[in-house]
Structures are given as C-alpha cells and as structure tokens.
Image (cartoon, grey):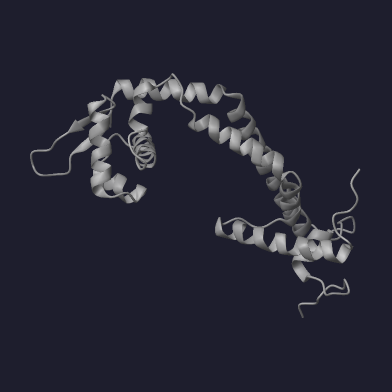
Amino acid sequence: MYGPRFKSVIEQAKVAIDGLSRRAKVYKNNDHEFDPLIHSFLFRHRRYLFHVLTKGTQALLRRRPEGPNVHRWRSATLQTPEISRVCIDLLTVQEEVTVSQIESVSGASRESVRKCLNHAVELGLLNRHKNRRKKPEKFTLTNLMNEELADRHTAKFLDEDVVNLARAITIIDDVRGMAQKSRDFEKNNPRGMDTWPTLQEDLVEFGIDDNGNYISKN
C-alpha cells in the first residue's frame, strides 16, 4: 500500500483544480458541458481507458484479409485514408459523389482527391460517370466495394477490442446522461433531500487559497 502522493490536501486540491480546468477546455472545444465528477472518473481510470482506446483503434485500423482491394486503395498514400473514408461516408447518404464534394469535406487538394478516385476506379471499387455537357463527373459504389465494405465492417464489429472500446464509450456516455438528468431533476424539483456540491464541483466553482479556504467569486 503506497502512501499519499501529496504532502497535504491543499497541494492535492490545487493540482486537481489545474487538471479540472485543463479538461474543462477540452469539453468546451467539443461543445459539451463539463462535469467534474465524470472527469474525476476518467482521470482515475485513465491508464486503463488509454489501453482500451489504443487497442480498439489498432483493431479498427489493423490490416485484415477481408476487403483486400479496399485496403490496397486506402494504403496508396498518406492522404488516401482520409479521402477514401470521406468518399465512402458521402456515398452512404447519397447515390453519387463528385471531386468537389470530397475536396470540400476532406480538406485535401483537388489533385489528391482526383488521384484517389482514379485509383478506386482502377481497382473496381468505384464507377465513373462522365457527363458530355461539361458537368462534373460523378462516382458511385460498385458491387465489389459494397461487398468488401460489408466484409470489413462485419470483421470489425466482431473484434473483441472494438467491442470493448464501444462498451467503454457507451458506459461513459450513459453515466454522463444520467448525471445530466439528475442535475435537471434537482434544478426543476428542489427538495431538502438534495445533496450539497461535491469537493470537485466546489473546487471548480470557487478555487482555494494557500490556506485551503474557498475563494468567493463575489
């Protein structure tokens, strides 16, 4: 059993405030309300969560026997993975796609997008539809692309590391959702049973001075 990491509660509280403030910016940048209690859970278990996230990401990106032509397409250049995924995502919500549409979403150069799509056509993954009236050429999925994507998705959905990542994300999201419902419930229906703010919540709200006293914001 290890002893305490910090010499005093005040020292630990100040380190906690710095960490909470730092992560609050991440929540804000991603348009989410910051919850000190949820963050404390993520911080306490972060090494395991790093492990789960890394293993899940590796599993999603791992080379597999399924979908060899899709893998060949994605591995052509450093930009191809992003361009190809944007292309496929667009084609899941619309029947056809143009170079300009992919360029706009991916941020890649027009030439890079064109080369990527040409390669997909060569591999039999995309159909090219040229227009004689000088309108932009359009691309659609081939049956080969549909089948290889289905094979790859099936393999990934069955992967234990992907499942563990999905489960962890879902659990965290469920806890965040429950916490928000609890706050809304207390706000809309206050009662004497309501608990007082936790230490983490007060540290974020007020901060502390060198003597361990809360700093009033008034």
In the figure, residue 169 lies in which quadrant?
Answer: top right
Looking at the rendered image, the quarter that the N terminus falls into is top right
- For image coordinates 34% across by 35% down, the residue present is 91
In the image: residue 25, left or right of residue 66? right
Q: Residue furthest bottom?
A: 218
In the image: residue 100, left or right of residue 82? left
Question: Residue 144: x, y in percent?
Answer: 31, 20
In the image: residue 61, left or right of residue 32? left
Question: Residue 7: x, y in percent?
Answer: 89, 61
Q: Tell me if residue 15 comes above or below residue 104 in the rendering.
A: below
Q: Tell me if residue 146 comes above or below residue 36 in the rendering.
A: above
Is residue 133 visible to the viewer in this orientation of the structure? Answer: yes
Q: How many marks?
A: 0
Which of the pair 176/169 is nearer the observer? Answer: 169
In the figure, residue 167 lies in which quadrant?
Answer: top right
Which of the pair 74/199 is nearer the observer? Answer: 74
- For image coordinates 76% across by 77% down, the residue present is 217
Q: Residue furthest left?
A: 132
- For image coordinates 54% across by 29% down, the residue present is 59
Which of the pair 207/52 is nearer the observer? Answer: 52
- For image coordinates 37% across by 33% down, the residue present is 75
Is residue 174 visible to the viewer in this orientation of the structure? Answer: no
In the figure, residue 51 lies in which quadrant?
Answer: top right
Question: Residue 182: x, y in percent?
Answer: 76, 51
Which of the pair 104/192 is nearer the observer? Answer: 104
Question: Residue 146: x, y in percent?
Answer: 35, 24
